[in-house]
Image (cartoon, grey):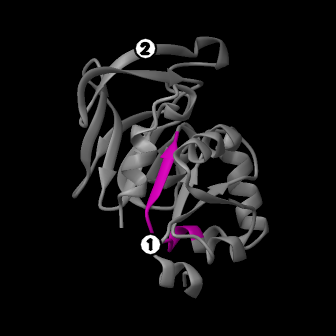
């Protein structure tokens, strides 16, 4: 249930899951866009937001904390717009590989953790996105790979021939970090989702 004051004004209040990871980079992007945001640290915070960003970080940590604090199921049932980057895309998936786990099932995708190798194998490359003909800078940090997309999932970003971003309804999963590039196009895409 979204806060009634937000429903009256229609202004988005973007929650950024702020337990661990690079949530501050997303907050800086939202500030530049002039968007109201809230650090999400528990289940009650989830009730107060219109949109959610799940940042990069360590998926095992987020799994442990959200289950221990009792809001894993709230994330499974979260029906408002969501953007997950890197680790966020992992937990949004229906299936996770390496090791095999269940995610929140927000999108019918299978994603493989640490698919490009360790932290030392992190890299920056230019790929293609659906919203522009210009090359888009993509930062991959110990990044996952989308290895399967299912029903209702549309690719929206590619690195060479690999899908690195996908969308299903009001859910966006990116295996890279757009918040580290200074280009807010994916944050704007999230804000325009309902």
**Real-space Cα separation, disc 1 to disc 2, in angstroms:** 32 Å
Q: Residue at x 46, y 37 (%)?
A: 184
Q: Secondary structure at mark 2?
A: strand
Where residue 113 sits, quadrant-wise, is top right
Image position of 22 with respect to 116: above or below: below
Nearer-N-terminus badge (1/2): 1
Residue 45 is covered by the magenta coloring: no
Q: Badge 1: how crowded within 10 Å, few (<14), some, or many (20+)? A: some
Q: Is residue 58 visible?
A: no
Q: Is residue 167 left or right of residue 83?
A: left
Image position of 99 with respect to 177: above or below: below
- Residue named by callout 2: 125
Q: Badge 2: how crowded within 10 Å, few (<14), some, or many (20+)? A: few
Q: Quadrant of the N terminus?
A: bottom right
Where residue 126 sits, quadrant-wise, is top left
The magenta segment: 75-85
Q: Is residue 125 visible?
A: yes
Mark drawn on residue 79: 1
Q: Quadrant of the C terminus?
A: bottom left
Q: Is residue 110 left or right of residue 123?
A: left
Where residue 52 sits, quadrant-wise, is bottom right
Q: Is residue 67 left or right of residue 95?
A: right
Q: Residue at x 22, y 57 (%)?
A: 151
Q: Secondary structure at mark 1?
A: loop
Q: Nearer the viewer, residue 48 or 144?
A: 48
Q: Position of residue 63 (x, y in %)?
A: 68, 55
Q: Nearer the viewer, residue 83 or 120?
A: 83
Q: Position of residue 178 (x, y in %)?
A: 49, 32
């Amino acid at each position: 249930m979204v806060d009634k004051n937000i429903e009256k004004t229609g202004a988005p209040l973007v929650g950024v899951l702020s337990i661990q990871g690079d949530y501050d980079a997303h907050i800086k992007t939202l500030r530049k866009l002039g968007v109201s945001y809230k650090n999400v640290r528990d289940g009650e915070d989830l009730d107060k937001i219109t949109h959610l960003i799940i940042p990069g970080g360590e998926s095992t940590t987020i799994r442990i904390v959200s289950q221990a604090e009792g809001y894993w199921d709230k994330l499974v049932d979260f029906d408002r717009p969501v953007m997950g980057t890197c680790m966020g895309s992992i937990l949004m998936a229906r299936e996770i590989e390496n090791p095999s786990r269940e995610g929140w099932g927000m999108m019918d995708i299978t994603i493989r953790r640490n698919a490009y190798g360790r932290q030392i194998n992190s890299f920056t490359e230019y790929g293609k996105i659906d919203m522009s003909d210009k090359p888009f800078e993509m930062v991959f940090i110990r990044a996952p790979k989308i290895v399967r997309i299912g029903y209702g999932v549309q690719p929206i970003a590619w690195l060479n021939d690999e899908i690195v971003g996908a969308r299903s309804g009001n859910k966006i999963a990116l295996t890279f970090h757009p918040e580290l590039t200074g280009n807010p196009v994916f944050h704007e895409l999230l804000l325009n989702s309902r």
